Amino acid sequence: MPTRSRKQNKSPQSLLKFPKDTELVGLELELFLLSDTFVYPQYTIGLHAWFLDQVRNYDPELSAYLHDGESEKPFTVSALDGEIISSGRQVQLFADRTYRWYLTALSGRLVHWMTQWVENLPKELNLRGSPLQIRACNIAHAPSSYAQLLESEHGDTVCLKFISPTSFRRKGHHLPLPMPINVFQSYLRRWNDFSDNPVDQEAFLAWVDDNAMILRHQLSSTKVLAGKKGSVTGFTGTVEFGLAKEAAKNKEFYDLFFALGKFAPYCGTGHKTTFGLGQTRLCSSFAAGEKDSTQANTVVTDIESFLAKRIEDLTAIFKGQRKRSGGDRANEIASKWATILGRREMGESLQVIAEDLGIPYETVKTYAKLARRALKSQD
């Protein structure tokens, strides 16, 4: 049952303290609204932007790195966890409900910023004009370090719950399957970027390919919006990974395999983890046939699925029209046209779309006109 919250406007208090050697941490913000409100389907873009604004207020240089850095991103951002429904062309949030929002940090530098930030949290999270009151900030994933993950005890398997749609890039397409090599590659990339103990990726993934296997799974797939453009077919559910008996002969890779499993809740899985996708949790191993409740925690509203499908269909149309020109540039333009037109058809303003995509307003306006013209020519 949803939790009722008290209507208050006091600054949220936080007594969170992280050890000095902390490199990894996950936070949970408890949010509530004073009145029912509506937000656009791609509201996770607004959550992403609000977080970067918070960083910029304290450390502009760090914010620029998080926004523009070409390496892996040292953070994840979830969608809102709580009662959300489709309502017309928007999604609705309710007053007197508790919503939870999760943030993680994967580097000591970002953890240091979070330590300062939680000492003076803002009163509200402004989501494109929809203020969510911040009631509390809690630890979601315990402060840790990469060395501690390697040294901690582990079982014989790695069981993971993928609680928001998860997908991987493969040969220019989305792969909505938790193949061990793809799952652990996504963790290793971030591990190698932010830990002081990088590992040879090619050698480790060859070992994973030879030794790792899926023991059990309960999965479903869905199409969702993906960050600033396009749509993704992703999977949710539970997967238990195991290793062949011979795997333990390589102690370095054997220990790393289980450390990466513990790393998963901090770094998320697959791509678009800074826009709510790939949220991952550790779980106990489960018996075959046992009912999994993970999917009850995943909210993909009807309007999100509809818009994701519409953008995918438009992208296919525009790519088909641009086959002669071909190349990455043509595909990129087709994707932008589809995203802009799809969101415009749902009633979003060109100004908001321009801000979300980081494209000048006049360019978005031109793309919208060209997309409409191209769609009419298709008819």
Image (cartoon, rainbow, N blue to C red):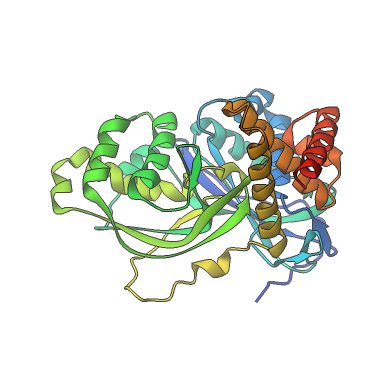
The quadrant of the image that shows the N terminus is: bottom right
Q: Quadrant of residue 251?
A: top left
Task: Judge whether 215 appears above or below 124 on screen.
Answer: below
Quadrant in which residue 144 is drawn: top left
Q: Is residue 100 above or below residue 152?
A: below
Task: Work out whether residue 227 can be spotted.
Answer: no
Q: Residue 56: percent from the left, percent from the top?
A: 70, 30
Residue in the picture at 48% in, 54% down: 280
| Place of residue 292 in the rendered image (x, y in percent of width and height, measured from the top left) | 45, 72
Q: How many marks?
A: 0
Q: Is residue 81 left or right of residue 263?
A: right
| Residue 213 drawn at (x, y percent) | 27, 54
150 to the left or right of 100:
left
Q: Nearer the viewer, residue 277 or 149?
A: 277
Instruction: Give the residue at the far top of this rendering.
Output: 61
Between residues 291 and 16, which one lies in front from this camera angle? 291
Q: Quadrant of residue 300?
A: bottom right
Q: Position of residue 361 (x, y in %)?
A: 84, 31
The answer to whether residue 212 shows anywhere in this view is yes
Q: Is residue 71 left or right of residue 348?
A: left
Q: Nearer the viewer, residue 48 or 123?
A: 48
Q: Residue at x 47, y 36 (%)?
A: 20
Q: Is residue 366 above or below residue 311?
A: above
- Left or right of residue 355: residue 28: left
